[in-house]
Image (cartoon, grey):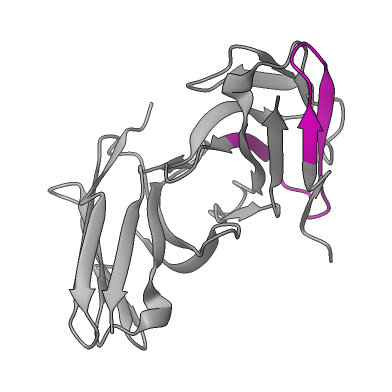
Amino acid sequence: NAGVTQTPKFRILKIGQSMTLQCAQDMNHNYMYWYRQDPGMGLKLIYYSVGAGITDKGEVPNGYNVSRSTTEDFPLRLELAAPSQTSVYFCASSSHYRGETEAFFGQGTRLTVV
Amino acid sequence: GENVEQHPSTLSVQEGDSAVIKCTYSDSASNYFPWYKQELGKRPQLIIDIRSNVGEKKDQRIAVTLNKTAKHFSLHITETQPEDSAVYFCAGAGGYQKVTFGIGTKLQVIP
């Protein structure tokens, strides 16, 4: 049971480049989330999804896009990378069936935009 | 939607003393309140949780209390040790609401 898997672990992007952060979970969770965490700061919600085909904005969605074509995968797309997007990104998932709402996190992606 | 407020943002205690972190929530429909610990450079991980039908839960040196009437819950760490130094996040969730996190508390245990 792998849990939540994020790739890559580290990435350096140049300003204006694009990339996709991958996130996959094998727990059949219906909810998935993307957070960013700046140094010494808390978790800021970028986007979340309550199920395949459904996504919604969090507090800081600008500059990002997501899709949820399957229950397992929830990729995060950065179209035009900016230095302000330098951060650690965490993907998480949770199940809201039978009151099981614990969130499980991936190991994080450290992104630097130069 | 749910709003979770957490305080203090930073907390320093002497080794062996107790630490208390407090959170409040806004949505009375929330019924699940987990606490996460994030060590430096690592992902947040669940350390303890409490459901709305319970007022207190304890696991060795950590305990969580919940007051549904006042909509607040707290994390208590007794006999703190240097390895307790980390960032702690509270969260609220319930039904089909997404999990909502507090801003985090950076706990420093001074040897």
Which residue reaches farthest left?
A: B70
Identify the image quadrant of the N terminus of chain A. Answer: bottom right
Identify the image quadrant of the C terminus of chain A. Answer: top right
Q: Is residue A19 left or right of residue B19?
A: right
Q: Residue at position x 25%, y 88% from top?
A: B79
User: For the magenta stretch, what is the residue range?
Assistant: A11-35
Q: Is residue B48 left or right of residue B22?
A: right
Q: Main secondary structure of the magenta part?
A: strand
Find residue A19 and report its horizontal and vertical position in percent: 84, 23
Check residue A32 for magenta coloring. yes
Find residue B13 and report its horizontal and vertical position in percent: 20, 73
Q: Residue at position x 79%, y 38% from top?
A: A11
Find residue B57 and report its horizontal and vertical position in percent: 32, 75
Above or below: residue B31 compared with residue B5? below
Q: Nearer the viewer, residue B91 or B30?
A: B91
Q: Is residue B53 visible?
A: no
Q: Is residue B38 visible?
A: yes
Check residue A82 for magenta coloring. no
Q: Residue at position x 43%, y 80% from top?
A: B83
Q: Nearer the viewer, residue A32 or B53?
A: A32
Above or below: residue B91 compared with residue A81? below
Q: Is residue A24 left or right of residue B76?
A: right
Instruction: Write down the quadrant of residue B86 in the picture.
Output: bottom left
Q: Residue at position x 19%, y 46% from top?
A: B71
Find residue B10 and report its horizontal and vertical position in percent: 25, 54
Above or below: residue A40 compared with residue B57? above
Q: Nearer the viewer, residue B107 or A51?
A: B107
Q: Is residue B57 left or right of residue A94?
A: left
Instruction: Write down the quadrant of residue B82 in the picture.
Output: bottom left
